[in-house]
């Protein structure tokens, strides 16, 4: 998962992420780098907290990036901005 | 042929046989369930009409449907006769009309009941036949699974360049299975024995294993099909060297090219399939999914294209906190064995049959569909049992939550924290979790500890005031997955908080660790009804259950999940007071004071066994 460092996550952040997710998530994040990168590129463009999302919403990253991007694009900007304050509202928005 | 090739040739048809028996088992189990459901309907009906006149107010349509279904009667004419009799009985008993049934009508009633009893006999016979058939087929399936697993392990041992142990008696037993199989050609048997002896001689002589494939050759094969696999192959170089078989890869890619599916996979998944699958596994999956509308979904899961058994029931691990994960190396082998195509199908069918409405391509679906089937079922059963999933909401329920780990423990905690089926909870929090089921995922382990501590430290009113946010019926943001502060952000601080505020069961219950192991090894949410005959459980039911709330026991103010206690005790049930105490406290974060209260209620002497009820 070293590629996550390109998204301004350091070693401690990556360890924190690994400790928050299960082994299946670690495998998904490791092997499907291409899809995860596309998702992360999009999420960072929307200025969302990718560390929190990687830690706590791993189910997002199993999705094809185009499906995820389409879904997020349908969410109002105001609501997206709220996400960084309270990531749990994502469950209601999706 | 090499030893590995001979064993692989043995493995391939075994997978086919196992899939076939597995399919038959599934079909028979479905039929058995239908028969059992029908038996139950009939049994209820028989009980209802034990006083025959009661038939006037019983819905006989359902029963007549069954009589027709199982060809006990030819048509519904009997229902017409019955309806007029029922109207007459209604008049006699409900409207007090001075009339009575004539002999013909009495005979018709008796005839109907006799048909029902005949049906019951027929169903019991079917049940018996199905059970026997299932048992026998299960034995075959278990045998195939056992041989497949043994062969896989042996092949891995042979492939592993770092494993230079001699093949032992256990390995020889696997070889013997093949030798004793009359369907295997004599030449193959001879070859097998020779290779076995050669293998062991080579290990004795200290020879290294020369089974590395040149990765440049592998890259070239992919190039033949216009696929640039060089960077992925270099990334997984050591795995490619061990697992790549050039002719196997070429066969798979040729098939994929011929069927025009080669570009449907990303490179990592394609390499995974080429290393760990074979022509048969790929073509089988292609044939099966071509019949489905949702075939594109399967191209996103490489293990669906590799021979895999259904996930085994593994010992569940209780999450004890923020443990540092051991660094296990990521491999495409892991990716190739996540879930079989058959299990994916099982999951999709199961979820649809249960009433969930979902798009398999939507966010969250893929992770859930890739969850092992028994874990998926247990999660659904638990969520239903605790009232989170209902008939009313199932079609709207977000399936991403169904892949969650340790759901049952978390449900128990929400009950004990007064946030689900809350005892003495304010209305806005009593069923907080039903409004926000996502908190089963979002609530972090340390947050549970904070809440347990607050619940046992403050008064009931202060507890809810403390944890509430400004928005009515929501928890404070401090407690959500966001900020926990310095208190509980590191493994050490979490451990310290736990030690300072709570008491560990193994300090006051003899043999707690062994009870915990029994509890932890079980995935089931079933409660054994026999335990309600136990005096210790009867005592709990009589003195500590709460009328109108089936989810809690309250021990001098300490709320404990009732279903947790019953479930745990169903597993242990050795009649000892320690096992009862273990069943109660397992999974909870309890202060000394709370433990004292519980112990006093059930007459448990802390640190030793004093049995009195």
Image: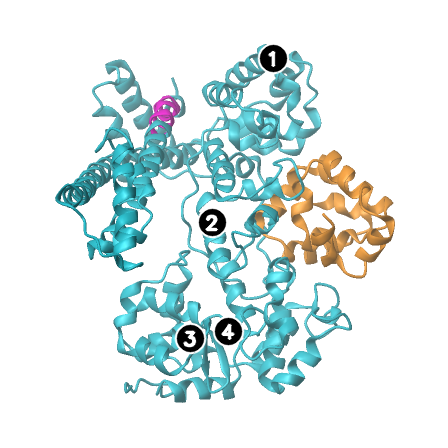
For label 1, the crowd category at 10 Å Cα-Cα, with few meaning under 14, some 14 to 19 and many 20 or more, is few
Check the rendered structure and report the hue given to chain A: orange
Residue B491 quadrant: bottom right
Quick check: B6 above or below B597? above
Residue B125 placement, left or right of B82: left
Q: Nearer the viewer, residue B98 or B42?
A: B98
The stretch of residues the image draws in magenta is B6-18
- Residue at the (72%, 40%) spot, across then down: A36
For label 4, the crowd category at 10 Å Cα-Cα, with few meaning under 14, some 14 to 19 and many 20 or more, is many
Q: Nearer the viewer, residue B611 or B145?
A: B611
Residue indicated by mark 1: B257
Whether residue B328 is visible here, answered yes or no, is no
Residue B193 placement, left or right of B375: left
4 and 2 marks in contact (CB < 8 Å): no
Q: Picture coordinates of residue B420 (x, y %)?
A: 56, 68
Residue indicated by mark 4: B588
| Sequence-wise first label, 4 or 2 | 2
| Sequence-wise first label, 1 or 4 | 1
Residue B132 quadrant: top left
Residue indicated by mark 2: B375
Tags 3 and 1 on a common chain = yes
Mark number displayed over residue B481: none
Q: Picture coordinates of residue B309 (x, y %)?
A: 42, 35
- Residue at the (67%, 29%) spot, across then down: B232
Residue B446 placement, left or right of B514: right
- Of all chains, the one bearing label 3 is B
- Of all chains, the one bearing label 4 is B
Whether residue B609 is visible here, answered yes or no, is yes
């Amino acid at each position: 998962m070293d590629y996550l460092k390109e998204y301004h996550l350091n070693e401690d952040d990556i360890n924190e992420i690994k400790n928050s997710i299960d082994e299946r998530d670690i495998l998904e994040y490791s092997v499907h780098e291409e899809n995860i990168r596309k998702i992360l590129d999009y999420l960072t463009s929307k200025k969302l907290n990718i560390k929190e999302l990687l830690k706590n919403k791993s189910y997002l990253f199993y999705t094809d990036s185009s499906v995820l991007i389409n879904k997020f694009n349908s969410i109002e900007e105001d609501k997206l901005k709220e996400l960084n304050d309270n990531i749990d509202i994502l469950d209601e928005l999706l | 042929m090499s030893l590995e090739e001979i064993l692989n040739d043995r493995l391939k048809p075994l997978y086919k046989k196992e899939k076939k028996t597995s399919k038959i088992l599934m079909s028979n189990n479905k039929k058995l369930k239908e028969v059992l459901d029908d038996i139950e309907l009939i049994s209820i009906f028989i009980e209802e009409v034990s006083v025959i006149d009661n038939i006037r107010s019983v819905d006989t349509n359902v029963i007549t449907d069954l009589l027709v279904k199982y060809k006990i009667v030819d048509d519904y004419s009997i229902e017409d006769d019955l309806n007029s009799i029922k109207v007459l009985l209604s008049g006699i008993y409900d409207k007090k009309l001075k009339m009575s049934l004539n002999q013909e009508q009495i005979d018709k009633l008796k005839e109907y009941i006799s048909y029902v009893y005949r049906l019951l006999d027929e169903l019991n016979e079917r049940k018996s036949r199905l059970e026997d058939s299932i048992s026998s087929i299960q034995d075959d399936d278990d045998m195939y699974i056992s041989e497949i697993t043994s062969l896989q392990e042996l092949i891995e041992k042979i492939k592993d360049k770092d494993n230079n142990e001699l093949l032992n008696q256990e390995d020889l037993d696997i070889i013997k299975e093949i030798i004793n199989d009359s369907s295997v050609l004599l030449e193959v048997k001879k070859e097998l024995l020779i290779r076995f002896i050669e293998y062991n001689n080579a290990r004795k002589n200290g020879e290294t294993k020369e089974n590395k494939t040149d990765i440049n050759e592998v890259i070239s094969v992919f190039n033949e099909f216009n696929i640039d696999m060089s960077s992925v192959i270099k990334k997984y170089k050591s795995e490619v060297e061990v697992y790549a078989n050039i002719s196997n890869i070429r066969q798979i890619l040729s098939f994929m090219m011929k069927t025009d599916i080669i570009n449907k996979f990303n490179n990592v998944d394609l390499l995974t399939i080429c290393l760990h699958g074979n022509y048969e596994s790929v073509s089988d999956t292609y044939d099966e999914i071509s019949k489905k509308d949702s075939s594109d979904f399967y191209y996103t899961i490489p293990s669906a294209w590799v021979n895999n058994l259904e996930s085994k029931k593994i010992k569940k691990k209780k999450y004890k906190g923020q443990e540092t994960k051991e660094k296990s190396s990521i491999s495409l082998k892991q990716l190739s064995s996540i879930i079989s195509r058959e299990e994916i199908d099982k999951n999709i069918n199961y979820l649809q049959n249960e009433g969930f409405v979902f798009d398999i391509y939507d966010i969250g679906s893929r992770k859930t569909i890739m969850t092992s089937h028994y874990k998926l079922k247990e999660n659904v059963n638990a969520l239903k049992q605790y009232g989170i999933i209902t008939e009313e909401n199932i079609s709207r329920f977000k399936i991403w939550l169904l892949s969650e780990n340790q759901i049952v423990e978390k449900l128990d905690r929400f009950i004990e924290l007064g946030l689900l089926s809350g005892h003495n909870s304010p209305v806005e929090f009593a069923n907080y979790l039903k409004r926000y089921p996502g908190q089963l995922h979002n609530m972090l382990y340390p947050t549970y500890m904070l809440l347990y501590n607050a619940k046992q430290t403050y008064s009931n009113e202060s507890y809810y005031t403390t944890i509430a946010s400004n928005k009515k019926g929501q928890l404070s943001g401090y407690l959500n997955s966001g900020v926990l502060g310095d208190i509980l952000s590191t493994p050490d601080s979490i451990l310290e908080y736990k030690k300072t505020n709570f008491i560990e069961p193994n300090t006051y219950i003899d043999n707690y660790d062994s009870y915990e192991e029994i509890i932890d090894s079980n995935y089931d949410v079933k409660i054994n009804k026999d335990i309600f005959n136990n005096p210790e459980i009867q005592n709990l039911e009589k003195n500590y259950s709460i009328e109108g709330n089936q989810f809690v026991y309250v021990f001098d103010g300490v709320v404990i999940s009732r279903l947790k206690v019953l479930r745990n005790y169903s597993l242990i049930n050795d009649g000892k007071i320690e096992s009862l105490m273990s069943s109660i406290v397992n999974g909870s974060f309890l202060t000394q004071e709370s433990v004292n209260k519980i112990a006093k209620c059930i007459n448990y002497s802390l640190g030793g066994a004093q049995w009195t009820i």
